[in-house]
Each structure stands twice: as structure tokens, then as C-alpha cells.
Amino acid sequence: MARRGRQAEAARNDLRLLRAAHEVFTTQGFDAPVSAIAKEAGVGMGSLYRRYRTKEELLQRLCLIAMERAVEAAEAGMAEADPWDGLALYVRTCVANRSGALAPVAGTIEVTDEMWRTSRKATELAGGLIARAREAGVLRSDVTTLDISLLMEQFSRPAPDREQPNVKARLLTIALDGLRAPGASELPDEPPSMEWYEARWGSAP
């Protein structure tokens, strides 16, 4: 019984640490000291270092969680009968989860095999959502999976302190309408490539 109690407390501490780390890193920058994370989480430095030996380990865990949530969001989108509703649900969920908020850390940490696998699963599922919406004629034909990923990344950035709470929701609705077929303006230049995107994180295995 005592062991289960300690395990439950450790799990709660880990959750507090992860939430605090995401908040600190995405608002104060990735150079923020881990002491700021421990303070935000209300735990001691010892608790932090017992769970994550380095800042890199903590960032790797945060990135993996973000990728797992993107997978869940894509699966939820595919469960929607309407192709547009499914795509919009995916985008809105990822933005609400701030799935792309950790993108600036790309190239500064080692990407684990689990991170690569989860990232590619998320990309594959998102690609299915986008292909379904395109085939249904509700998504403009020149929009790629990576276009939408980068759009969500932009909306995942922290809002200015004095921004009104409804501003992001309004702008996201405008952006989603811009994805609808047929599209009023031709998109400039070639779309970004997956090779470029993955290269931001490092060499893929």
C-alpha cells in the first residue's frame, strides 16, 4: 500500500514537472534554468534530477508527449465522419495542445528512435486526414501535410501578455477558412519538403 502511495506521488510530481517545464520553456525560452521549472512545479531540485538527469532528457520527454498528442488528435480526426470536420478537429486540438510550441528546440537536442517513430506515425496519420479532405473536395489541392504542420506550429507560439483571449481563436478560424477548396489565391513557390523539415531536428536514422 505504501509503495502504491509513493508511486502515485511520484506520478503526480512527474506530471507537475512536465507541465511546469512546458510552461517555462515556451514562455521563458529553452535557456531557462531547471531551477525555474522546479519552482513552478512546487517540487525540489532533487525530485527533478531523480526523474530527469539532464535538461535534454526533459526536453526529449516533452517533445515525445507532444508527438503522442498529435497522434491522438489525428486519430480523433479520422474518427469524424465528415472529412472537413475531422481535419478542423485535428488542427484545433493540436493548437489547443500547443503541439508545435517546442519546434524551436529542433537541432539542439538528440532525437531518440522513439521520437522519430512517433513523429512519423503522426505525419502518416495527418497525411491520411489531409488526403481524405482533399479527395472530398473540401481542402484546396495545393496544401500539403507540412503546410498544415507549420501552420499549427505558428499558432502554438505563446500569445503576447496583453493579447485578448479570443484573438487566437478568431485568427485560427480565418486560417482554416483559407485552407478550404478551391482557394482564392495561388500559393507562392514550391511547398516545403519533408527532408528539410526533418533536417531541422538532425539526421534521421
Image (cartoon, grey):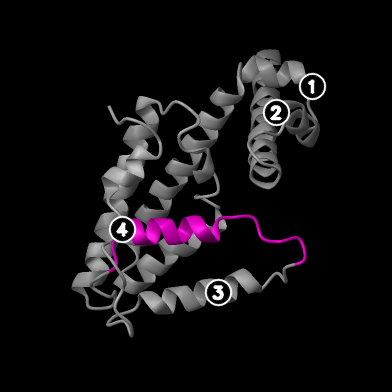
- The CA distance from mark 3 to mark 1 is 40 Å
- Per the image, label 4 sits on a secondary structure element best described as helix
- In the rendered structure, which disc, 2 or 3, sits on the residue that comes first in sequence? 2
The numbered dot on residue 145 is 4
Q: Kindly state the secondary structure of the residue where label 1 is placed.
A: loop
Q: Dot 3: what SS?
A: helix
Question: Within 10 Å of the Cα at label 4, are there few (<14), some (14-19), or many (20+) other Cα atoms?
Answer: many
Tell me if residue 147 is in the magenta stretch.
yes
The secondary element bearing badge 2 is classed as helix
Q: Position of residue 10 (x, y in %)?
A: 67, 23
Q: Which of marks 3 and 1 is nearer the N terminus?
A: 1
Residue projecting furthest to the left: 135
Magenta stretch: give its range: 143-162
**Of the residues tagged 3 and 1, which is closer to the observer?**
3
Amino acid type at image mark 4? Thr
Residue 122's x, y, as percent?
A: 34, 46
Given this view, does label 2 or label 3 mark the residue nearer the observer?
3
Pick the front one: 108 or 99: 108
Instruction: Estimate the x, y position of residue 13 in percent, counting from the top left.
Output: 70, 28
User: Taking 14 as reference, is 159 above or below it?
Assistant: below
| Residue tagged 1 | 44
Q: Which residue is drawn at 72% across and 68% down?
A: 163
Q: Mark 3 points at which residue?
A: 171
- The tag earlier along the polypeptide, 1 or 4, is 1
Question: Residue 110 occupies which quadrant of the picture?
Answer: top left
First in sequence: mark 3 or mark 4? 4
How dense is the environment of label 2, judged by Cα within 10 Å: few (below 14), some, or many (20 and up)?
Answer: many
Q: Which of marks 1 and 2 is nearer the N terminus?
A: 2
Q: How crowded is mark 1: few (under 14 residues within 10 Å), some or many (20 or more)?
A: few
